[in-house]
Amino acid sequence: MKITVAHVGYLHLKGVKNNSTIEVDDSKTVEDLLDRFGVKKEHQRYIVPIVNEKKRDLSYRLKNHDTLFLYLPVGGG
């Protein structure tokens, strides 16, 4: 299946360019993709996946033609 992946500029994903369409196996979760992109497990909990403009969990199973935006909230003050 094909999905589109976009992310905030300061998030580095190994092997995928921002706003690109990639081929993935059926029944893959967002967490599976983060593993594929080289994001360490301890860092994954800070990433907020937005799929088709809805906030999802890392366990969300992706579907053909989904648009995945990976957001990394930044705090400060």
Image (cartoon, rainbow, N blue to C red):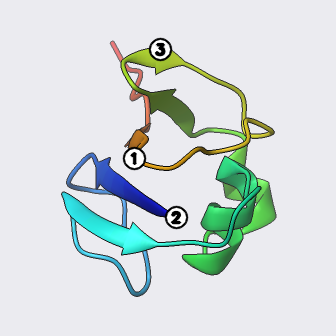
The residue depicted at 20 percent of the width and 54 percent of the height is 9
Give the vertical position of 42 relative to 53 (above or below). below
Near-viewer residue (8 or 59) = 59
Categorize mark 3 by other alpha carbons within 10 Å: few (<14), some (14-19), many (20+).
few
Q: Earlier in the sequence, mark 3 or mark 1?
A: 3
Whole-percent x, y for residue 21 in the image: 28, 65
Badge nearest the viewer, 3 or 1? 1
Q: Give the side of residue 7 with respect to residue 36, left or right.
A: left
Q: Give the side of residue 32 with respect to residue 6, left or right.
A: right
Distance between mark 2 and mark 1 Cα atoms: 7 Å
Look at mark 3 in the image and give the residue it sits on: 54
Residue contact at pointers 2 and 3, CB within 8 angstroms? no
In the structure shown, which secondary structural element does the residue marked by tag 3 occupy? Answer: strand
Give the vertical position of 69 relative to 4 (above or below). above
Indicate the amino acid at tag 3.
Lys
Look at mark 1 in the image and give the residue it sits on: 65
Categorize mark 2 by other alpha carbons within 10 Å: few (<14), some (14-19), many (20+).
some
Distance between mark 2 and mark 3 Cα atoms: 20 Å
In the structure shown, which secondary structural element does the residue marked by tag 2 occupy? Answer: loop
Q: Earlier in the sequence, mark 2 or mark 3?
A: 2
Give the vertical position of 6 relative to 60 (above or below). below
The residue depicted at 63 percent of the width and 78 percent of the height is 36
Residue contact at pointers 2 and 1, CB within 8 angstroms? yes
Quadrant for the C terminus in the image: top left
Near-viewer residue (17 or 72) = 17
Q: Which mark is residue 1?
A: 2
The residue depicted at 81 percent of the width and 39 percent of the height is 59
Indicate the amino acid at tag 1.
His
Q: Give the side of residue 75 with respect to residue 41, left or right.
A: left
